[in-house]
Image (cartoon, grey):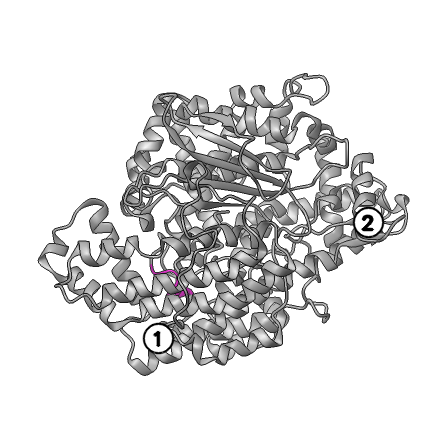
Amino acid sequence: MKNRLLAAAAPAVLASLALSGTAAMTLASPALAADAAPKATAPYDGVFAKPSTLPFHAPDFAKIKDSDWKPAIEAGIAQKRAEMKAIANNTAAPTFANTLVAMERAGVLYDRVYNVFSQLTSANTSDALDAVDTEVSPQIAAMEDAIYLDPKLFARVKAVHDSAAGKALTGEDAMLLKTQYAKFVHRGALLSPAQKTELKAMNTEISTLETQFAQQLTQANNAHAVVFDSKEQLAGLSDAQIAAAAERAAKDGKPGKYVLPLINYTQQPVLAQLTNRESRRRVFEESINRASSGDQYDTTGIVTKIATLRAKKAKLLGQPDFGTFQMYDRMINTPAKAMTFMKGFVPALRATQDREAGVLLEAAKADGVTTLQPWDWTYYAEKVRKAKYDLDESAIKPYFEVYNVLENGVFYAANKTYGLTFKRRTDLPVYHPTMRVYEVIDSDGKTPLGLFYFDPFSRPSKRGGAWMNNFVEQSNLLGEKPVIANTLNIDPPAEGQPALASWDDVTTMFHEFGHALHGFFAHQQYPALSGTNTARDFVEFPSQFNENFATVPEVLAHYAKHYKTGAPLPAGLLDKIDAAGKFNQSVGFGETLEAAMLDIKWHTLTPEEAAQPPIEFEKQALASLGLRTDLIPPRYRTPYFRHIWDNGYASGYYSYIWTEVLAHDGWDWVEKHGGMTRANGDHIRTTFLGQGHSKDLDVLYRDFTGHDPELEPMLEARGLSGK
């Protein structure tokens, strides 16, 4: 996942502390009005006042203290507002250079500090960071409104947009003008003064609620970790997993017990292993009820407020619903088109779900189970997988040591395809000791592209999921090269044990590095168009496309080696992995499709409809999909659907499915043109991976493949084509 915190113009901050009453009161504070400039203060001279002296202006984590964040962010906000106000008040006639390019130069201090802060509140948060997060998020929303609702600034942008000179622009210049003008209109620049005042209040409240949701959900994930009293209750887990569970319990002040943490989505990996059915039920129910149990971590009240405010905001902006408002710049640009696209999968998927449910029930009957339950599905699916495909996930993991997969798999594929090389840097500070840093060098063997930070393991201070973010965004205008991080949530090893990855972890590593390549190959003039700053339903294309390299035989042979013996992955096991991967599409594809359709249903509600109890609405929405949601809940239920309530994927979760179509169709082109070759790598980089948003997205895709997206390669890859 591309972390939208660094891609969106109006980021909502991630962290894990509930909004305090004092912080909530700031919503009504006149000081936060979007058109009220912050009070004058002494010039900022803190740690972020100048670019870092480290290579590529990488953040110097050794020098940053918790007390640095608030003054730095607030100074960045004040500076950006002042710079934008100066552009708006410029008495010279508006031109592309003195308006659009000047805006691209504004906010350097804000970006410098917030790009780092947003990653830490996601990946290594603390009470101190959460408190700052809660305080600054409404200030950030107010800053964005002050910019995009400034009538003088918009008048200048519109004047350039409507001028003969503006219409004569080409290339990146034309795209910058087009996208910025559309963004101003989208943000409410055409509203009346009274409507703008109303919108500002909504945006501030929405931003604060999104931050509160993020913090509360992180707390819920930690609070609902499942505690077991005995080793016997964990039968089926490996000795290493049980040892790690005991270590977690000891760290949590529960010596002698065992703690299984919850990962971000519904189905927990341990459900495939636990032989004790009651243990499986407990894990599943803690997972599915983690943020809707009526306790202090319950997010349903926040969800109602966010959904209602979003619907009201869309209505104010003249749109029928928030989904329509949100999708204005997408490849699939209306909720109706997204639903039509997704409904096309339902008949084949429902038939698969019914068929696989029957197969699993037959397997369960051998254990005396007469009625299959959701917590049984992955357990018996794994049993059937082992029996049918002779594939045991626990037997695979020793071949995938985490850092070996990265260096001899992910990096190796990038070297063979694009000519990149990677140099480990142990001289640069990191924010957690398990991280690694690498310098990325271009295909000429001497030109540095930037720095890559790798943060692989889960911990209580990190939110769930996996993502890419920029500490420093590439821009020729600003003379910046990218500093990029990939963050994952691989289960950390017990002390003294190797760090082993599941096959899903392996594909996630390749996925997130696809985002990183999108950032490293960026060669754009303007930061707004650089790298991953593309529409939501295109940004996941490079990452899903890069997953394909994980199974290229040459790549697999280079990294899939037993961590003890160095023995290669047994011959034929990849074919079994591929065949087994097409089994259990009921969950593998079904839970994602359900979540994506639920997202669209949430964001096509009127304000009155959005105010209904979330769990009741979800129940009705899922029942209408025509899928087996009784046995296969969506990947994220409403109360812990972080993507849509905080991560910028509102009306956009379908993009994972749409970009999978692009990725498989794109890979079909690669295979038809000789596979993993340097020539193909150059073509990929030239046509789309290095283009950012310098062209319309459908043009980028046609430049790469020579045709519009085709569905069949994805259906074949998913085993749903009937072939």
Look at 41% across and 41% down and name the residue there: 662
Asked if residue 713 shows in the view, the reply is: no
Q: Nearer the viewer, residue 477 or 542?
A: 477
Identify residue type, mark 2.
Ala
Residue 722 locus on image (x, y percent):
52, 38
Left or right for 162, reference 207: left
Mark 2 vs 1, N-terminal side: 1
Q: Secondary structure at mark 1?
A: loop
Few, some or many C-alpha atoms within 10 Å of disc 1 (few <14, some 14-19, many ≥20)?
some
Task: Report the disc number at residue 719.
Answer: none
Residue 339 locus on image (x, y percent):
45, 58
Q: Is residue 674 above or below residue 226?
A: above
Query: What residue is pinned by disc 2?
Result: 249
**Residue range of the region highlighted in magenta in the rendering:** 323-328
Total marks shown come to 2
Q: Residue furthest bottom?
A: 194
Q: Is residue 608 above or below residue 156?
A: below
Identify residue type, mark 1.
Asp
Q: Secondary structure at mark 2?
A: helix
Q: Is residue 227 above or below residue 306?
A: above
Few, some or many C-alpha atoms within 10 Å of disc 2 (few <14, some 14-19, many ≥20)?
many
Look at 37% across and 39% down and name the residue there: 481
**Secondary structure of the magenta portion, mostly?**
helix
Left or right for 541, reference 97: right
Q: Are marks 2 and 1 in contact (CB under 8 Å)?
A: no
Residue 393 locus on image (x, y percent):
71, 33
Q: Nearer the viewer, residue 690 or 547?
A: 690
Query: What residue is pinned by disc 1?
Result: 35
368 part of magenta stretch: no
